[in-house]
Amino acid sequence: MKKLLICAAAMLIALAASAQDGPTTTWPYLYPDFTQGTIYLLGGTTVVQDMNVHIRHDRLHYIDKGGVVKEAVLDEVMMVTIGDDRYVNVYGEMMKVIAEGEKKGLVVAEILGDFSALLETGGAYGVSSTTSATRKLSSIETDAQINQPHMLLKQSKTDGQMLNLITNYYIVTSKYRIKATKKDVTASIPKDRQDEWKAWLKKNKIKWNKPGSLVAVADFLSE
């Protein structure tokens, strides 16, 4: 019994630590803290910064020399590495590279916070749905991180509500930047390749929610 209690306590501690490292409405970031990485600009210039990915719109935030959080202008940003992870700029969002095909096509992930879940109705413990939703909204400081001291934001991380993540996959090639769904990809295929695409699809059973399977689609679009 004593061993079981010790194991249960250890699991609770681990879960609590994991929750503290996850994104919240007051810390809407992918990483537990800002991490050193490199920004690769279109002109070939590189910049080293402590960075994080904001999960409201996959924006890139960094810490300036004064310890204040700033948002990077993505117009000239081609790619970013944060730790061991790689991101590419897709429609103004920094999407994480999940897999790379033999023909240099990429499968990337758009990773966003599920803010809409905070607005779901259903008050608890006698609290009305409207009041509950208002309280949840009041804790969403998604646009308040810019120009704020990094340490102040970090200290307030656990003051917000936990955020779940939503992942959408995209395919990026030299010609395409498209959501990785059968409907979107089919609509993007030129008319003169539609028959080829349909035959290819019939031969290759693609699992549209599996990056390892989507790499084959990236290779097809790279031809």
Image: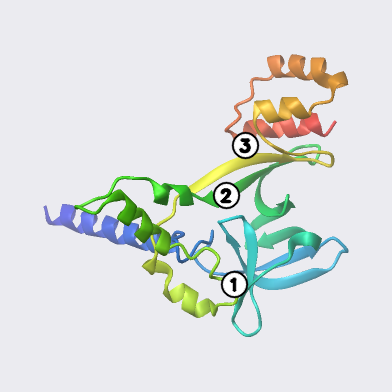
Quadrant position of the C terminus in the picture: top right
Label 3 crowd (10 A; few <14 / some 14-19 / many >=20): many
| Badge 3 amino acid | Pro
Q: First in sequence, mark 2 or 1: give its number.
A: 2
- Kindly identify which residue carries mark 3: 211
**Mark 2 to mark 1 CA distance (whole Å):** 20 Å
- Kindly identify which residue carries mark 1: 146
Q: Residue at x 58, y 61 (%)?
A: 54
Foreground pick, 117 / 178: 117
| Badge 2 amino acid | Ile
Q: Is residue 182 above or below residue 128?
A: above
- Kindly identify which residue carries mark 2: 111
**Residue 26 located left or right of residue 122:** right
> Which circle marks residue 167 in the picture?
none
Give the image location of residue 19, x and y in percent.
38, 59
Foreground pick, 14 / 154: 154
Q: Nearer the viewer, mark 2 or mark 1?
A: 1
Residue 105, by quadrant, is: top right
Label 1 crowd (10 A; few <14 / some 14-19 / many >=20): some
**Mark 2 to mark 3 CA distance (whole Å):** 14 Å
Q: Are marks 2 and 1 in contact (CB under 8 Å)?
A: no
Q: Nearer the viewer, mark 3 or mark 1?
A: 1
